[in-house]
Image (cartoon, grey):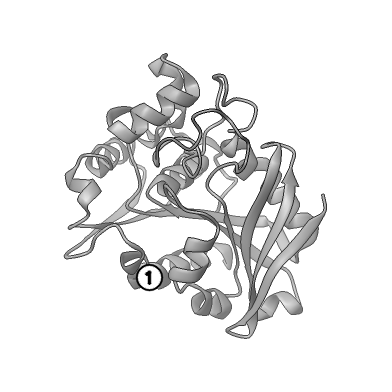
Amino acid sequence: MALKQVSSNRCFEGFQKVFEHDSAELKCKMKFGIYLPPKAETGKCPVLYWLSGLTCTEQNFITKAGFQQAAAEHGLIVVAPDTSPRGCNIEGEDESWDFGTGAGFYVDATEEPWKTNYRMYSYIKDELPKLINANFPTDPERMSIFGHSMGGHGALILALKNPGKYKSVSAFAPICNPIQCQWGKKALGGYLGSDVSKWEAYDATQLVKSYAGSPLDILIDQGKDDQFLSAGQLLPDNFIAACTEQKVPVVFRLQQGYDHSYFFIATFINDHIKHHAKYLNA
């Protein structure tokens, strides 16, 4: 698959780049950001995938999170894909900010008219890693995943649905129990239809209840003053309770005074990079 470089910037002795490619899974052009640490010039590096939240593109994380210095120090390639297909010209795609464009929810849609293009789950799980491993100096055996909000939901479900695939997982303010919140009901209902049992396959709280894979050490940071936490969109307590019951280790940190923004992410990003480096560089 041909990659076209869109931009390249020197950053902490490595490079922050953006590429475009034709996605077979999503049937449209997709962009992703990739940070190549200095170590990538001389050897293979582990890969950490970041999944962004609602309304985001590949740009938000690479320009606002300030992760590059820690990634350079720990020798991690960091990949930040877009959050949904672009330019598919589906009717109703741009009507609301929490469904359609910018809101792929990391599921494989089964409903018309979404099912042809909205296959972000398979794109992140299969197509993107193959593309990255074929074109960059990666160690395919060492891969981890993290994300924010809708992307935190994506990171958790990908790790829980694919035991052993990712060495570690973490999230900032993840949507933990989408079958119980308005964002989730709207997205999962639209992409997957009205059968709620099909939604459960993309709900971290449901998935962890039957998780029996290799041990996962989950790190979650949540701002205490997050407007979406108080609005009942994130529901971390439900996830923590399910993890406790299943004896799945989770470190949950409620951060006093922080909201849902990238200022919150930037504050704690180094802790997350360090969390992943511990497993990726073991």
Q: To which residue does mark 1 refer? A: 266
> Does 161 sit left or right of 140 as displayed?
left
Farthest top residue in view: 195
- Give the camera-side residue of 169 and 15: 15
Farthest bottom residue in view: 13
> Does 1 sit left or right of 185 as displayed?
right
Q: Secondary structure at mark 1?
A: helix
Residue shown at the point (68%, 78%) measured from the top left: 39
Amino acid bearing label 1: Ala
- Give the camera-side residue of 106 and 39: 106
- The x and y percentages for residue 35 are 62, 70
> Does 148 sit left or right of 282 as displayed?
left
Quadrant housing residue 33: bottom right
- The x and y percentages for residue 20 are 71, 56
- The x and y percentages for residue 112 are 57, 19
Quadrant housing residue 226: bottom left
> Does 151 sit left or right of 91 as displayed?
left
Residue shown at the point (57%, 78%) measured from the top left: 72
Quadrant housing residue 153: top left
Instruction: Report if residue 168 is visible in the image.
Output: no
Residue shown at the point (53%, 62%) measured from the top left: 59
Residue shown at the point (47%, 62%) measured from the top left: 60
- Give the camera-side residue of 211 and 43: 43
**Which quadrant does the C terminus fall into?**
bottom right
207 above or below 234?
A: above
- The x and y percentages for residue 240 are 27, 43
Instruction: Report if residue 98 is visible in the image.
Output: yes
